[in-house]
Image (tube, coloured by chain):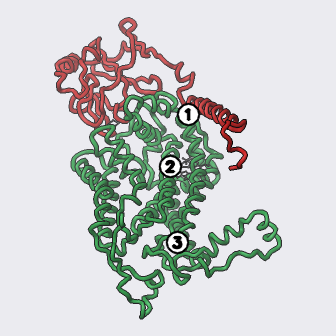
Amino acid sequence: MSGHPTYVPTHPAAQWLERRLPILGLLHSSFVVFPNPRNLNYWWTFGGILSFMLAAQIATGVVLVMHYTPQASLAFASVEHIMRDVNYGWLFRYAHANGASMFFVALYIHMFRGMYYGSYKEPREVLWLLGILIYLLTIATAFMGYVLPWGQMSFWGATVITSLFSAVPFVGDSITTWLWGGYAVDNATLNRFFSLHYLLPFMIAGVVVLHIWALHVPGSNNPTGLEPKTAKDTLPFHPYFTVKDGFALACFLIFFSWFIFYVPNYLNHADNYIEANPLQTPAHIVPEWYYLPFYAILRSIPSKLGGTIAMFAAVLIFAFLPWLDSSRIKSAVYRPLYKIAFWAFVVCAVLLGYVGAQPPEGVYVLAARLLTAYYFLHFLVILPLLGIYEKPRPLPASIADSVLGPPKEAIHADANPAHPRKSG
Amino acid sequence: MVASTITDEPTRRDFLFIATGAVGVVGAAAAVWPFLSQMSPDATTLAAASIEVDIGNIAPGQIVTVKWRGKPVFISHRTPAEIEAARATPLSELPDPATDESRAPNPEWLIVVGICTHLGCVPIGNEGPYNGYFCPCHGSVYDASGRIRQGPAPSNLAIPPYKFAGDAKVTIG
Ligand code: HEM
Ligand code: FES
């Protein structure tokens, strides 16, 4: 985008470095003068919040490892040691445990923002796919992290989730034995999960770099879903978006701190303060809240293999959104029917989460089945058809117009798209 | 690329390209194997294979849980009523048909791996509509022969290899 200054280092040291490694110029063009659509709302601040939370998880995680022992007979006691004996150990552990939940809060908001405003559509498909990759890696990371304190929920959550692979025909049992490194979840399992729990966040960080690279090619989407056309449509990242992201982050951290300092175990399960016992399953096992909708889908299908397939499909189907949504219009603001479908899907996902936390009996079984059916219906039927039958509302001529109102002479009929769907 | 490489005859570079590529592929495949294999059960895990259990003081109606290969094994001293009910069940009522005779050759003793065949929780003994085992995780129900009757589990509770040694001992594994 033209109209924004490029980086010219003034300090001799900066000039020296810039001639050898132009990293200051890269940071300057990416995070100082980078042109963002001027109409970004607060839903766009969760990318920055997520970056912060990833850094926070790594920082608190590295500290925890300094005091944690990845050995089945010592792990539980070492976490209690962190909680009771290590200076501020309780703070680091509560920040890390609740930080994982906050990560998912921000991640889900970030993803649903993308869905509401059609951010996965051309030209941002690769950006979306990298985001899905981050989501999958985060799911794996948090799952393995939850095993580390070696409580009852750690152990039985690990057992149930790894046993999903035993549903694979013929080789299922060999796969689980290989994953466990034994005939049940045990010390070998704990050790490999610890190794991977340390590794994966750094892989996430790598994919985040690619994600931001892919973002900075087309630039951010925005509430209108229009691409910027002139310099009037954008504002430089600094100070306009640094302050907006910073303010939102500060508010988010207050929310996060409330969990750490006032209800640190609200999102945890009491059973996880009982040391793992391979001979006894807790009466009611449930996964962490961020997996509950998928857990409900798993249980809704009365077959082991079928339930496993449905659960993995429910996660992976997000990757196909760019091709399932047939509408050319990005933003739900201009798609009256999609707006309804979007909120119906949000309600469906939240209810699935609620049902996933209930015992699988009575009315919950039926509810889980209906909601699972609707979940897939949304992706596989509603999204493809809406693009064909929906009549979009008229789009503004530009991003600047949507904010400042149209210039008097520019109210043309051509703001109204004649062909609301893809030609293909 | 460079004009001089385009000849009809294979050149020394073509040979090196194919030879290096072939060795590289074989080498990469050979290097992957140890990476995969190290995750399988190690020698100590494989060695801890069998256990001997004293069953002389398990009363009729009682189920005792022992640990074998890191998993629970249920040793159930069945009552005559349980045996009779298990033997009388017609195979047509079973999702995973198996006779009680084949599962408990010595009818007083049922020895099964206490791992639900759904997703691996430990079922609770003397529970459920068939007075056998009930899995709290997703509600699978087994009968007094450890056979699946209801719920998402696909098959009967597994039977470990075991041998009775006299009246009062059993070797599992
Ligand atoms: C995306 C980033 C990460 C997520 C989502 C995450 C998630 C989790 C979760 C959910 C737990 C269980 C907390 C509990 O209930 O006690 C955990 C524990 C743990 N994590 Fe992480 N983690 C992340 C990054 C890291 C990193 C980078 C390290 C090490 C460098 C680390 C080290 C640990 C350790 C040692 C524990 C066990 C202590 C404990 O249970 O509090 N984590 N993690
Ligand atoms: S693990 Fe037993 S019913 Fe699912």
Q: Amino acid at mark 3?
A: Ala
Q: Tag 2 or tag 3, which sits nearer the N-term? A: 2
Badges 1 and 2, same chain:
yes
Disc 1 is placed on an element classified as: loop
**The image quarter in which residue A330 lies:** bottom left
Disc 2 is placed on an element classified as: helix
Count of labels in the image: 3
Spot the red chain and give its letter. Answer: B
In this rendering, is residue A299 above or below B95? Answer: below
Which label was assigned to residue A398? none
Q: Tag 2 or tag 1, which sits nearer the N-term? A: 1
B30 vs A374, left or right, is right
Mark 3 crowd level (few <14, some 14–19, many ≥20, 10 Å Cα): some
Camera sees residue A69: yes
Q: Amino acid at mark 2?
A: Ala
Q: Which residue is mark 1?
A: A73
- Which hue is chain A drawn in? green
Estimate the x, y position of residue A256 in percent, counting from the top left.
51, 63
Q: Chain of mark 2?
A: A
Estimate the x, y position of residue A234 in percent, counting from the top left.
54, 79
Q: Amino acid at mark 1?
A: Ser
Q: Which residue is mark 2?
A: A142
Mark 1 crowd level (few <14, some 14–19, many ≥20, 10 Å Cα): some
Q: Chain of mark 3?
A: A
Q: Quadrant of the C terminus of chain B?
A: top left
Q: Nearer the viewer, mark 1 or mark 2?
A: 2
For this rendering, which residue is in front, B103 or A38? A38
Which label was assigned to residue A248? 3
For this rendering, which residue is in front, A158 or A258? A158
For this rendering, which residue is in front, A377 or B119? A377
Tell me the residue at 29%/25% (across/down). B146
